[in-house]
Image (cartoon, rainbow, N blue to C red):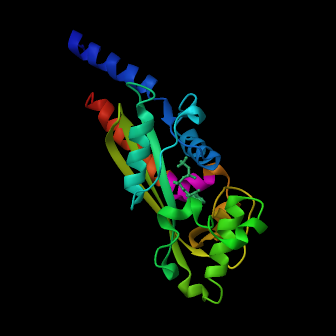
Amino acid sequence: MGYDATTIRTSKYREHRRMTARTVLLATSNAGKLRDFAGAAAAFGITIANIPNFSSLPEVVEDGATFEENARKKAESYSVAVPGELVLADDSGLEIDALGGAPGVRSARYAADDPHAAECSTVDEANNAKVLRELKGVPEQKRSARFVCVLAAARDGQTVHTFRGSAEGIILDAPRGKNGFGYDPLFYFPQIDKTFAELSAEEKAQYSHRGKAFRAFLSWCRVADDQNL
Ligand code: ITT
């Protein structure tokens, strides 16, 4: 089968885009998220890198009412630091039904004003302890919850697309497992009879809100590549 010059040019261009798309630039200060993304990307031969000098960039205030608002805000602000590059930002959190959806967009700072926080050695520990206190006496069948992740992809200060993933589970009455970060030790995932803290980064990516949102992002990249967007 013969190819004309335009076909060859186009396929070379697509190949070039695929090659350059093998590194995904992330904007996050959260080492746990970086590990999760690396676990999700491994199966696709993709490398995850944080934006160069990320820690020296001015911090974005996450004051949006939704995960999407915050994800867009982070992706747009940080993408300005790397002109022409596609930057991915993640806003995520835990919604517990018995707490009316809390901690939700406040997940990272849930125990910030809590007087018991000083007794804990890490922010994650303080957040988990607060969840356990708030759910004291709530029976298992009423401890349903979900992790939500919204990814925003932005270039030069403009959001190009957003992607959402969620995972449904149950909040235990004591932590289980040593892996992961944040609320993972309390988040029991019935489908595999494990908490997210009992999974490797690669296993977590199979089931997690972040893994699902990341796969949606990769599908979009493939379509965008094929359409030369
Ligand atoms: P960046 O904004 O720099 O990415 P952050 O930790 O401030 O980092 P968020 O505002 O999105 O990020 O808050 C997410 C919080 O939600 C995170 O700190 C955890 O407490 C919780 N969380 C999100 N995904 C989680 C996961 O996969 N496992 C456990 N906890 C998670």
- The residue shown at (60%, 89%) is 139
Tell me what residue is drawn at x 45 percent, y 23 percent.
Answer: 19
Image quadrant holding the C terminus, namely: top left
Q: Position of residue 165 (x, y in %)?
A: 44, 57
Residue 87 is one of the magenta-drawn residues? no
The image shows a total of numbered marks equal to 0
Tell me: 56 left or right of 62: right
- Nearer to us in this view, 67 or 32: 67
Q: Quadrant of ligand 1?
A: bottom right
- Residue 165 left/right relative to 129: left
Q: Point out residue 5 in the picture as x, y percentages from the top left corner.
A: 23, 9
Q: Is residue 107 visible?
A: yes
Main secondary structure along the magenta-highlighted residues: helix
Q: Which span is picked out in magenta?
A: 203-210
- Residue 215 placed where, x, y %? 44, 47
Q: Can residue 175 be seen in this view?
A: no
As displayed, is residue 29 above or below residue 64?
above
Residue situated in front as seen by the camera: 161 or 29: 29
Placement of the N terminus among the 4 image quadrants? top left
Please give the name of the residue rendered at 72% of the width and 76% of the height, measured from the top-left corner: 174
- Residue sitting nearer the eye, 218 or 82: 82
Q: Is residue 152 above or below residue 180?
A: above
Q: Position of residue 36 (x, y in %)?
A: 59, 48
Quadrant in which residue 15 is drawn: top left
Q: Does the magenta stretch include residue 207?
A: yes
